[in-house]
Amino acid sequence: MAVDLMESKTLKPDVETLVTEPQAQEVSITTRDLSLWYGDFQALEDVTLNIRKGIITSLIGPSGCGKTTLLRCFNRINERYGNVTTTGEIRILDKNILDPDVSTRQLRKSVGMVFQRPNPLPISIYDNVLFGSNIHAAHKGISRSARDQIVEEALREVDLWDAVKNRLKQRATWLTLEQQQKLCIARLLPLKPEIILMDEPCSALDAEGTEKIENLIERLREDFTIVVVTHNMAQARRASDECVFMLLGEIIEHRPTTDLFMTPENEKTEMYIQGRYG
Amino acid sequence: MANVNLNPNDGNNPFARTPQEIKRKRIELGAQFTFLMMTMALVIPMLWIMWDLAYRASDVLSYTYMVIGVGCVGLLIPYFLIEAAKRNEHKRKLFMGLAIAILAGISIWIVCITVFNMDNGGFDFLTLNPKKRMTAGGVWAPLIGTFLLVLLSLVISAPIGILAGVYLSEFANDNWFTRIINLAVVNLAGVPSIVHGLFGVGAFVYFMDMGRSLLAASSTVAVMTLPVIITSTKEALTSVPQSFRAACWNMGATKWQTIRTLVLPNSINGILTGVILQVARAAGETAPILFTGALYYKKIADTGFDSFVPYGLEDRFMALSYHLFTVATQVQDVPESFQFGTAVVLIGMVLMVNSISIGFRIYLRARKRW
Ligand SMILES: Nc1ncnc2c1ncn2[C@@H]1O[C@H](COP(=O)(O)OP(=O)(O)OP(=O)(O)O)[C@@H](O)[C@H]1O
Ligand SMILES: [Mg+2]
């Protein structure tokens, strides 16, 4: 009897690790029956989705299918864009973020967003990186040495430190587009986010810039859950672990990237990957 | 299908001008000439009027012209010299020396003629109060009156207008209520000033019991300038790219944090332009102050502190625009140069404020980049 118990205790975790890595099974964002209306136009329809922790999920689909809208739901920024109604449930860190007792300020701190067009603020590089910390800091602010350290760490993490360390006080809008996009990622890091949402982060960049940003995203996956919207099928294939295909506000297919591209289950997915939709 | 020949030249030059092209070119030249003429039709009369005014006022203002003229030249030349010195390493010392010499020379010169040449009139027209039924003295009392009026009305209208503009453009939801307010603001900007004047009499003089006073007149002028300040504030805020706001919001900034740290610093330029342009209107309008506080003549202290703050909030006051009306039409035997002088001082005041605002804008634009 006693031996039996012992065995089952030691065995159980072993079995799980054999099947899949338990780390990767953890879910970071869950949506249940999420619908969203802009006025009376329904942009999302009963979206039910599990986005797993610590991997890169890409979101593909033709223009206007609601990729950006879905992304914006995850930090509730949609509310700032006019007349929006949301129903359903979005769970992040096991909390429904649509609950009335959720502070959007704290939510957006842990769910950062990177945009299609790099949008560094028209202030210095240094202040850009610190912007998030400053708006969330208690009213006394942060000490000078702590600030320097935050800036250096964030910029090192995105591989920008060596390029800009001598001109931290320069306006961020003078950087190249690729550097600007890196800065836009760097300025999220001091807030220690759980999730980073990226809305076509490379579409304003050239091939070389795209590659560098992709490598960066690849490196960041260890620490954050990353959701990337992309129009570029090759990029989705290259740089993501799981892939979600959307059409007209609905999720059509959500599977590991290689499976989705090799053996699409839905014929609409197949048509899209073969380039027969816009 | 007929083969349309797009290139009728069959010579060697494949890029030769076609007849249609020559015709179009002629039409374009004609249009350009017409536009030029229209511009001239605006500029020439304006220059001529300004010149005429300045010339006829020269009896009382010649000294002022001279000081301002020499002052401007005396500041501009050193300015360009200093700019040149910045660019030219070798002759830096020479340029800087020259600039300093010119500045010093002019200041000494101005001090000298001010001290030794007091008897030729000097700044009398600006610094003396009207005397002998406006036929002697100067325009100090109305000048300071207009100054106080403008200052007070801005103190009232700038905060209200700017904050209202911020609210309407950044916070207000797009519903019927906001739309009505926006419509009202746009339409109020077009209401004739005499109507504002009558409104002021009803609202401030009688209803709020301010009486005819500097305060009532300033409030009336403030109400008149509000719509434009609100509109220009809204426009300035809208010109800040939406993507900056998106960046802030997505890091969890509140709307007010976004406005304070990002939107206002980047639109202050346009907001100030709107405010400063209203200075010109506040200084120039006669109708709104006519019934609410301006006075035909008021005796004030000639010297000392009282001559700088001669009117309390409850007092009636003299103003340049009304004074111009008085000396031009209401009293006899006023020297012509007094009438034109008053006009020139009024215009000069407005021009000065405008040029300060232009300078300020250039300074701010040089700092702003995105
Ligand atoms: N603020 C808004 N108000 C009203 N309708 C909107 C708004 N934003 C988006 N829409 C509509 O919602 C639908 C989905 O838009 P969304 O921007 O999410 O698409 P998308 O998949 O990101 O497209 P793209 O690939 O072009 O970026 C579109 O039909 C769009 O017109
Ligand atoms: Mg989009």
Image (cartoon, coloured by chain):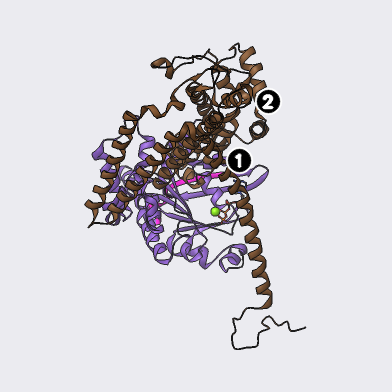
For the residue labelled by badge 1, is the local secondary structure a helix, a strand or a loop?
A: strand
Q: Is residue B182 visible?
A: yes
Residue of label 1: A84
Question: With respect to residue A164, does B203 lie above or below?
Answer: above
For the residue labelled by badge 2, is the local secondary structure a helix, a strand or a loop?
A: helix
Q: Amino acid at mark 2?
A: Val
In-front residue for pair B67/A202: B67
Q: Within 8 Å: ligand 1 and the Cβ of disc 1?
A: yes
The colour with which the image depicts chain B is: brown
- Say which quadrant the N terminus of chain B sits in: bottom right
In-front residue for pair A185/B151: B151
Question: With respect to residue B32, does A81 lie above or below?
Answer: above
In-front residue for pair B179/A251: B179
Query: Which chain contains the residue that carries disc 1?
Result: A
Instruction: Please give the range of residues in magenta.
Output: A19-34
Q: Would you identify the image quadrant in which residue B68 lies?
A: top left
Query: Which chain contains the residue that carries disc 2?
Result: B
Q: Which mark is residue B195?
A: 2
In-image side of A222 versus A145 (left or right)? right
Q: Within 8 Å: ligand 1 and the Cβ of disc 2?
A: no
Q: Is residue A94 visible?
A: no
Tag in front: 2 or 1? 2
Q: Residue at x 59, y 40 (%)?
A: A82
Chain letter, colour purple in render: A
